[in-house]
Image (spheres, grey):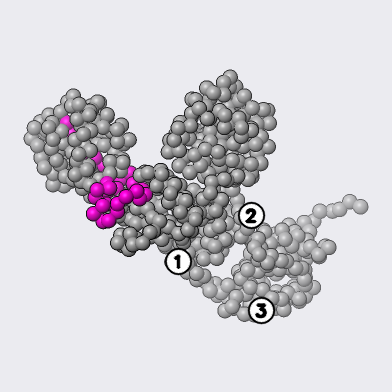
Amino acid sequence: MYKVEYDKYKIICFTENGRELAKKLAILLITNGKAKWADQSEVDDNSSIDKPVESLDEFVKENFKAENVLIFIGAAGIAVRAIAPYIKDKTTDPAVIVIDEKGKNVIPVLSGHIGGGVKEAKLIAMLLGAKPVLTTATDVENEFAVDVYAKANGFVISDMKAAKEFTARLLDEKKGYYYVDEGAEALVSGSIGYENIERVSDAGELLKGDKNFFVISYRDDEALSALGFKGDYLKLIPKCIAVGMGCKKGTDGEALYSFCTDKLKEAGIDERAVDALASASIKKDEDGLIFVSEKLDAYYVTFDADELMEIPGDFEASQFALEVTGCDNICERAVVAMGADEVLMHKTKGTGMTFAAGVLRPQKKGSLTVVGIGPGAYEDMTVRAQKALLESDVIAGYTVYCDLVRPYYKDKEYISTPMMGEEKRVELALLTAAKGKAVSLICSGDAGVYGMAGLAFLLGQKFPDVDIKVIPGVTAALSGAALLGAPLIHDFCLISMSDRLTPLELIEKRLRCAAMADMSIVIYNPESKGRKGYLKHACEVLMETLPPERVCGIANNIGRDGESCSVMTLAELKDADADMFSTVFIGNSTTANIGGKMVTQRGYKSER
């Protein structure tokens, strides 16, 4: 047995073939899928390659921790028996994945949703060119998974039994509803991305009848009961509350915890919503406060007294606290220092302790990735493109392109605009990214060839906090050329016949120059409903220089239903049918029709 470890990925294998696959997978993970192999030193710097394992049980025991991804390369039965003694709870168990040693199938066998097993299996399958084998009902049905949604957004599931019941009804009824409580609005933007999951703004309307629903709220059950929510309903709880506390040195932890939970209840806050407990640096080693943070499953953060005193605002001051700690109000100032933009409970006192609480709004920096999705078929997308879409929160694009990828990424929020809505589309994508979302802006073919990449950078100047990057795709010149044969072996140029942004006179000039240079020419956007006769006109311009028998071709609906191609002469091309889903190829003087294929010759001398 051998193990390969890289970051959270813990891989174990049992044969030499499995060992080679483990190393290959580690390298693909390290290089983010950009290389089939990498320099061995890069691997050694990032992982423990070729480390023998004496005990399978010790390997599992050591690594069976939340946030890890355990990968078994071998039989599924070995993995099941190995992990069985350590399985406790789906909310804390790590993802466990099984891969056959030939790397053909990737199977998430444990913690597929909350542990991220399904998402990781899809990623690994992309990297290896394998098939993800999914067995969870919501994944098989391409249905909304509430536990995946909760994990992706950092929400706590109030009751796993209620979550299962919601999912069971959803699979049966194909309809679900949700309500975002006041105060959590800023934490939930846009739609969930599933047409059959309807957001209801009126709690009263939601409670009419027997609807299958969940609530997103940081308020506790007693506070929500005032709105009519009672019984065993499902609640998703954002971890968005900052609690600030101060205390006398040596204050008992249980007493502090009791005081804290009492005040949370008084404020109507679910204690599971607490994300951070904050205090002054003088209290960084205060056992009682550390105890409270652990009980609340919250971060414990401290600030220097000078830093707290610089926080602007009107705070209730204590001269005693100022003399002892250097800060006149630890609890409330600490809440604001954490980034809370709304204080839910101002400083309140107990016996030798103080409390305050506020709401933390998302501060995550957004990103916009402009993704070329290729000609249209899923299998023609690059691994990097698939990975970007998998990891994004929102997918934006032309309506037709969104429809192409939606079946594979049903859990995403979508922003789509019709043709001619490019500027609005890019602006909406940037605005969404500015709110802290990871947005993928998709383009057919390549994002930088008549795509949205240039416009994204141009409009992105207004959004300096949004990171913009581009992922290339297979442009129609390449995918269409592959259908027709080999028309682009030598120098070629791309020319669009769309005169929406380029004057027709300039397009004509480019056609004439390309013909005079004896270049193979690829014409994009040859015709549209509003531009009839443009391809015929282009052929007439080209025939001022080129002979009518020049070999040409058309590729239609590349990578989509109705895909076809045909080889013809320039004279025949002039009267051919074409539309916005056609790509036209005009050969150079060496291009020939060889067995129905369009082949441009490079100048090689064949030996006879």
Q: In the rendered image of this protein, does residue 2 appear above or below residue 235?
A: above
Check disc 2: other Cα within 10 Å, few if <14, some if 14-19, many if 20+: some
Tell me where residue 458 appears, x and y as whole percent: 44, 60
Count of residue discs = 3
Q: Which mark is residue 537?
A: 3
Q: Nearer the viewer, mark 1 or mark 2?
A: 2
Q: Nearest the camera: 494 or 157? A: 157
Q: Amino acid at mark 1?
A: Glu
Check disc 1: other Cα within 10 Å, few if <14, some if 14-19, many if 20+: some
The residue segment tinted magenta is 218-247
What whole-number distance in Å separates the C-alpha atoms at marks 1 and 3? 29 Å
Q: Is residue 393 left or right of residue 587?
A: left
Q: Amino acid at mark 3?
A: His
Q: In the rendered image of this protein, does residue 134 appear above or below residue 528?
A: above
Q: Is residue 331 left or right of residue 413?
A: left
Q: Residue at x 45, y 42 (%)?
A: 114
Q: Residue at x 57, y 21 (%)?
A: 55
What whole-number distance in Å separates the C-alpha atoms at marks 1 and 2? 27 Å
**Label located before the other in sequence (1 or 3):** 1
Q: Secondary structure at mark 3?
A: helix
Q: Nearest the camera: 178 or 187? A: 178
Tell me where residue 485 appears, x and y as whole percent: 76, 60
Q: In the rendered image of this protein, does residue 376 appear above or below residue 541?
A: above
Q: Residue under circle 2?
A: 380
**Label located before the other in sequence (1 or 2):** 2
Q: Residue at x 66, y 78 (%)?
A: 537
